[in-house]
Image (cartoon, rainbow, N blue to C red):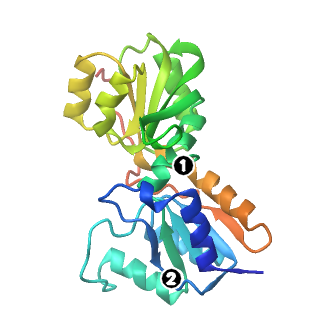
Amino acid sequence: MSIKLSSIVKRLEEVYPPNLAEDWDRVGLIAGRPSSPVDKVLVAVDPVEKVLAEAVAKGAQLVVTHHPLYLRGTSFVAATDPKGSLVHGLIENGIALFNAHTNADSATGGVADCLAQAVGLEDTRPLIPLDEHTGSGRIGRLSAPMPLREFASKVAQSLPACPAGILVGGDLDAPVSAIAVSGGSGDSFLADARRAGADVYICADLRHHPASEHLEGGKPYLICATHWASEWPWVPKCANMLQESFPEEIEVMISRICTDPWAARITPENKDC
């Protein structure tokens, strides 16, 4: 059994409406013929070579990723360039590529909701709402307060393992309960997390100066995960949605390959920070 690519694209856009994407974003079908038949789908975070190799090995005709291949325009897709090589690999192997980026961040059941659920939040709502259920980030609460150190350990265990781990900023012994989250880069929402009354804000890619200046002003304390790990909880959710939407027509597979750029975290022995 199989189904046309256009039917899968339609379903993805129903769940992750393109109109929820930021103006600067690029979402939707990147490569592929809408009339092509699909019977195997691979869902991943990043459209990179190792994910393409996994799709080829597993016989997928469609890869669904969170991140776009080209966020900015390009004039060349020669195979001498890594992204151009990926385009050639997709076409040569008959594999379509679709992405849902900031529209999947904001949508109900999207990246933000999946991250909030992964770290155990209850009574969640959008941090920067578009309406009652959609918008950027989420804020909720823990079932019971716990020290920041204990909660950070829980976050590390709840997210997929990757070499870089997580970073924590704040009073490690302070009790925390109100938690804000945003998958991926999140320093633009630091002020929003503070205004919302969060004790902790979880995101990725925090830079030194914004994090330092923020913590000088107090809560929310910060937990900085890696970009891939903070967004990966969406992958199985998206895969399950597609499998339930087309139970007889397609097989949906989950990519568990860590596509963070970091290979290891090396800390000096017997040295105090």
Residue furthest to the front in view is 131
Q: Earlier in the sequence, mark 2 or mark 1?
A: 2
**Compared to 123, does 103 lie above or below?**
below
Kindly indicate the quadrant of the structure image that contains residue 5. Answer: bottom right
Residue 152 visible in the current orientation: yes
Q: Residues within 10 Å of mark 1 (few under 14, many from 20)?
A: many
Seen at 58% across and 54% down, the residue is 235
Q: Is residue 7 or residue 213 the one in the foreground?
A: 7
- Quadrant assignment for the C terminus: top left
Percent across and percent down for residue 30 are 44, 75
Kindly identify the residue that appears in the image at 54 percent across and 81 percent down. Answer: 95
54 to the left or right of 91: right
Measured along the vertical axis of the image, is residue 44 above or below residue 192? below
Amino acid at circle 2: Gly
Q: Report x, y in % for residue 205.
A: 33, 42
Callout 2: 10 Å neighbours few (<14), some, many (20+)?
Answer: some
Describe the element under mark 1 as helix, strand or loop. Answer: loop
* Residue under label 1: 110
| x, y percent for residue 189 | 32, 35
Is 52 drawn above or below residue 147 in the view shown? below
How many callouts does the rendering have? Answer: 2
Residue situated in front as seen by the camera: 242 or 106:
106
Task: Kindly identify the residue that appears in the image at 46 percent across and 18 percent down.
Answer: 148
Q: Amino acid at mark 1?
A: Gly
Numbered circle sitting on residue 32: 2
Is residue 64 toward the left or the right of residue 253 in the image?
left
Whether residue 61 is visible, yes or no, is no
Q: Residue at x 49, y 25 (%)?
A: 152
Depth check: 114 or 245 in front? 245
Looking at the rendering, which quadrant does residue 146 occupy?
top right
Q: The N terminus lies in which quarter of the figure?
A: bottom right
Q: Position of residue 216 (x, y in %)?
A: 23, 18
